[in-house]
Image: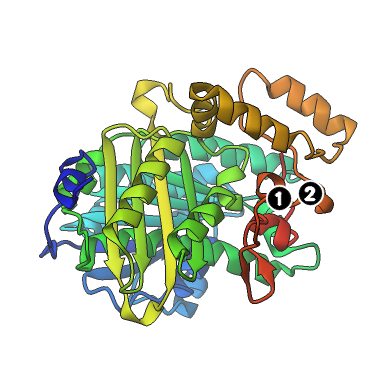
Amino acid sequence: MSQENFLDQDTSFSPANENPGIRAKIIGIGGAGMSLVDGLRFDDFQGVDHLVMDVDGRALSDSIASEKLAFGRRHTRGMGTGGEFALARKAIEEEKDLVRQKLEGIDVVFLLAGLGGGTGGGAVPVVARLARDAGALVFAFTPLPFSWEKGRHAQAEECLAELRKHANAVVPLPNDSLIQMGGPDATALECFAEAGRNVGKGISAICSLIFRRGMIDVDFAHLKKAFNRRAGRTLFGYGEGEGPDAIRHALRELMVCPMLHLPDVSKAADALLILITGGTGMSMKALQQASTEIRAEFKAGQHVVFGAHVDENMGDCVQITVLGATDLGAGSAKADVTPASEHVMAASPKARKAHESKLASVKPVARSSSSRKRGKAKDSIDQNTFDFMEDGNQRGIFDDLPSRNLYEGEDLDVPAYLRRGVKIAV
């Protein structure tokens, strides 16, 4: 396919566009939100401001954010909400005019808030609503409490449902999964740092599409049109690759990214953002193929925003980031669908037979009885869980290839979560 035909597809490609005058604001609400904002560095993006909001005056004074907003003094006297969601919501509602002033002229809002505490969970749905009313695109990244924190976890789920009514995309970051990504010996600080890295990757991808010129740039109007809907379930993932076949390796890493295999993650997207960043050796053909495979994997429709940027400092490295959301207004009808790979096998009996013979030798690890019971109870709802492979069969369907994709002693055909010992809750 020629570059012209490739660009003619409805994937929101456009000529070079600097999106002049676009403004973005990263807003951290409550303790967790402020910590995330303080850990982010986006000095390379002009037009991105930082704001932290809290009822705790002392916590605000410790933040390094350039802009701060204390609210709820009449209700809390600057001493926190004591974990009460209703109090935080009442406090922010009474000062919504002040919040509106902070949102004037902002085109994109990134909301960071932990939903397990009072301030973040109570205030973030209100701020999302005000930002949306002001005409901004709203993307939210929200750490969730541990599943064993029954009361806080239930409140967080309630806040998450309310937040999705107003935000364009919401990416939950469950503490349970962050611990598993960090390994059994990970400290609390390391797990929180993992949350910060995930938030940083998501925000950086969106800001890169908006503020940086690239091989394939994105017009902000296309981005806004694609995500101008209420967010249902979301998907967020990333992959990295190196070497002559860097894009292929990055795609493999993307498909096994732990963030794409969390229990609440959608397997399809009504709106999908794709950003590929790499060195000067990226070819248009490889970009086209990557875009096609990602669109097929996530059952993306016409609302796809694709950007490709060249960074001379990356050498032969490639990074792929995807962010997608189902349309809450449409009932999230596409949330659970058959993976694209299964459609390929169904279309080709020969390929299906070869695929099944290779998978026959892959023995799933036994799950506990409680896991099996939980799986049976959710069979009618979630079809996106899977069993993992034993160490002896980690290469799976790549086992019969004549050579291994080795890089610095690692076999890149073995999924990243297996190479790194990551355990994913199913």
Task: Tell which of 8 and 373 is nearer to you.
Answer: 8
Disc 2, SS: helix
Label 2 crowd (10 A; few <14 / some 14-19 / many >=20): some
Tell me residue 231's x, y (percent).
38, 36
Residue drawn at (49%, 52%), measured in percent from left and top? 237
393 left or right of 408? right
Q: Amino acid at mark 1?
A: Asp
Q: Are marks 1 and 2 in contact (CB under 8 Å)?
A: yes
Calculate the distance from the C-alpha at mark 1 to the C-alpha at mark 2. 8 Å
Label 1 crowd (10 A; few <14 / some 14-19 / many >=20): some
Disc 1, SS: loop
Residue drawn at (77%, 45%), measured in percent from left and top? 389
Q: Residue 377 has which mark?
A: none
In the image as oriented, which residue stretches furthest toward the front? Answer: 402
Q: Residue 399 has which mark?
A: 1
Tell me residue 240's x, y (percent).
50, 64
Residue drawn at (46%, 65%), measured in percent from left and top? 246
Q: Amino acid at mark 2?
A: Asn
In the rendered structure, which disc, 1 or 2, sits on the residue that comes first in sequence?
Answer: 2
346 left or right of 389? left
Task: Tell which of 68 and 148 is nearer to you.
Answer: 148
Residue drawn at (68%, 23%), measured in percent from left and top? 378
Q: Residue 393 has which mark?
A: 2
